[in-house]
Image (cartoon, rainbow, N blue to C red):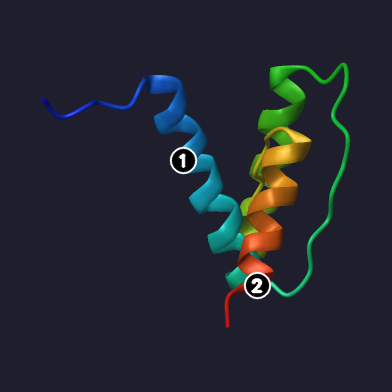
Amino acid sequence: MGVVKKSEKQQKKDQRWRRVQEAAFKYKNVLFIDANCVSSKQICQIRSKLRPIDACMVMGKNTLMRAALTAAKAKP
């Protein structure tokens, strides 16, 4: 049996999972928002405003975000 490579989609999910958990450990305050009908230019402007205050934006599906934060909370 050979080594099974992860698909690109699964690799992106894993990266997003790690980013959420890293943010959960790094920051003490978190803000969740629903971003419907937001253009890429608006997202770019928001991210540029967040950089100077040492904040980050992580976007993802609700279930992935919830599961990653629950797992991060369970770690000592």
The answer to the question of whether label 1 and label 2 lie on touching residues, with beta carbons closer than 8 A, is no
- Name the residue: 68% across, 71% down: 73
Callout 1 secondary element: helix
- Mark 1 neighbour class, 10 Å CA radius: few under 14, some 14 to 19, many 20 or more: few
Residue 55, image x, y percentages: 66, 59
Nearest-to-viewer mark from 1 and 2: 2
Residue at the image position 88 percent from the left and 34 percent from the top = 34
Numbered disc 2: secondary structure:
helix
Q: Residue at x 57, y 59 (%)?
A: 21
- Mark 1 and mark 2 lie on one chain; the one further toward the N terminus is 1
- Compared across the picture, whether 62 is left or right of 10 comes to right
Name the spot of residue 39 as percent of width and height, x first.
77, 17
Instruction: For label 2, count other residues whose C-alpha is less than 10 Å away and answer few (under 14), some (14-19) or many (20+).
Output: few
Give me the residue at 64% from left, 65% from top: 24
What type is the residue that disc 1 sits on?
Answer: Asp
Image quadrant for the C terminus?
bottom right
Q: Nearer the viewer, residue 13 or 1?
A: 1
* Residue receiving disc 2: 74
- Residue 14: mark in rendering: 1
Q: Amino acid at mark 2?
A: Ala
Q: How many numbered discs, if any?
A: 2
Task: Pick the residue in front: 3 or 29.
Answer: 3
| Vertical comparison of 67 with 55: above or below | above
Residue 11's quadrant in the figure? top left
Which of the 4 image quarters holds residue 1? top left
Residue positioned most to the bottom: 76
Image location of residue 58, percent across then percent down: 64, 44
Position above or below: 66 against 62: below
Separation of residues labelled 1 and 2 (CA atoms): 18 Å
Q: Which mark is residue 48?
A: none
